[in-house]
Amino acid sequence: LFVDRPLIILSSLTMFEWELSGSQIKEGESQALLMRLHEIRTRLSLEDNVVDPHQKSALRAQLLDAITENKMGAFLKFMVSHDPDFKVDVKIQRELDTANEAELAEIEAKLADALENLGESEVRDAMQRKAEFFARIGDKTQAEKTYIETMAKTVGSGQKIDLMFDQIRLAFFWNDYSAVKRLINQTTTMVEKGGDWERRNRLKVYNATFLLVGREFSEAAALFLDSISTFTCYELFSYRRFVLYTVICTTVAKTRNVIREQLVNAPDVLAVIRDIGTLHQFLNSLFKCEYPVFFRSLLSVLSMIDVDPFLHFHAAYILREVRAVAYRQFLQSYRSITLESMAKSFAISESLLDRTLSDYIATSRLNCRIDKVGGIITTCQPDSKNAQYQSILKTGDHLLNRIQKLSRVVSY
């Protein structure tokens, strides 16, 4: 029905040097326009010590090219009003507004014709075109309203779920995570009632991405790991980026056995992980206990995390967690070890190791003690039975206190 849709993909622009671009991307595996622009907006919002002003100038130029190419008049107004350094000739804004008005008039005419002369399917297609138009130009309010109207005209469960995915991406683009949560819950209900296998798998990735933003790494890792061999959400991000997210979440939240079975020995992961910067060194050096290599590769991985649209919120947290994982893994092999020996094993200074270990011990993240005078670290292997006993005592005391309070109320 609509053969002249505007370009909605920017395949030539990559956020990381290890991602595929242009002709390297297979048909059907391109990232959607809004998700690509979301990455650019994220980098523009970061501090200058993360993305320097020269890089930001280049990103603004790329963003303006995408805006003019895709006639995103409403989004241009948003950027000009929210980014003081995003300066654009007023003439460009007028041209885009004129083009948007003409395109909307054409869409409205086709919708009116469909309502008068065609069937329900053609009407639904015309309404979807209108919703996609508002989403593309950056009119969030009208896009949300028109998507709801299109949902009301849609009968098939598969088409409804696809419209929900469109709305989730729109919410991701605008960083509206309360809307993302609501839409994912609604989509989950739809999928449980009548979603096919492919859409169920796509929903796992959408849900995992939302959990990733909310720092629920354990739940996100479970969904990412379950999607390694079934990933098809190229409209969100590339498979290489998906592997990056999977490795980070799993390293932070899962056990060594899970890392070995589902990452280190996973054929689908092995096929691409060597092409993702130093991620292969990061994962394998941790698993093989090559800690100096692990710490060096960690710095490179953190540079990816710092500018990632879904991970940059958690850069400091991820650094703390993966260091704790490495320290815990190392100390499990010893009852005691000198601070000097452990520092040499990690190729870091004793003072840095002392500070970081002290922080982890103080917050009960590591079960060990440091003898500062003797320079010795003594591990304290957790006693599960004693921990259960202490938990029962604590819970019992709490219950007795509640009963006593209740008895006083009843007696009164």
Image: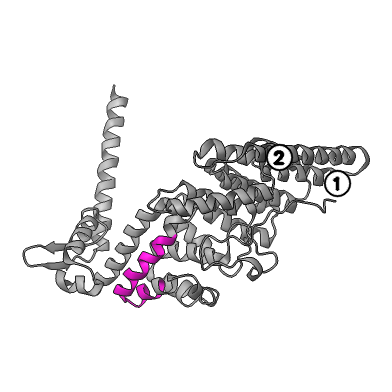
- Residue depicted at x 82% and y 51%: 2
Residue located farthest toward the left when viewing the structure as drawn:
373
Q: Vertical placement of 351 versus 363: above or below?
A: below
Q: Is residue 293 above or below residue 92?
A: below
Residue 356 in picture, x, y percent from top left: 23, 59
Q: Please state the horizontal and vertical placement of residue 345, each as a whole percent of the image.
A: 23, 74
Q: Is residue 332 visible?
A: no
Badge number at residue 95: 2
In front here: 268 or 239? 239
Residue 105 vertical position relative to residue 238 in the rendered view, above or below: above
The magenta stretch is 283-304
Distance CA(mark 2)–CA(mark 1) = 30 Å
Q: Within the magenta stretch, is there residue 293?
A: yes
Instruction: Identify the residue shown where x is 64% and y is 53%.
Output: 33
**Residue 347 lies in the magenta-colored region:** no
Q: What's under tag 1, amino acid-wise?
A: Glu
Q: Amino acid at mark 2?
A: Glu
Q: Quadrant of residue 247?
A: bottom left
Q: Main secondary structure of the magenta part?
A: helix
- Which residue is tagged 1? 122
Report whether 148 appears left or right of 223. right
What residue is drawn where x is 58% and y is 60%? 237
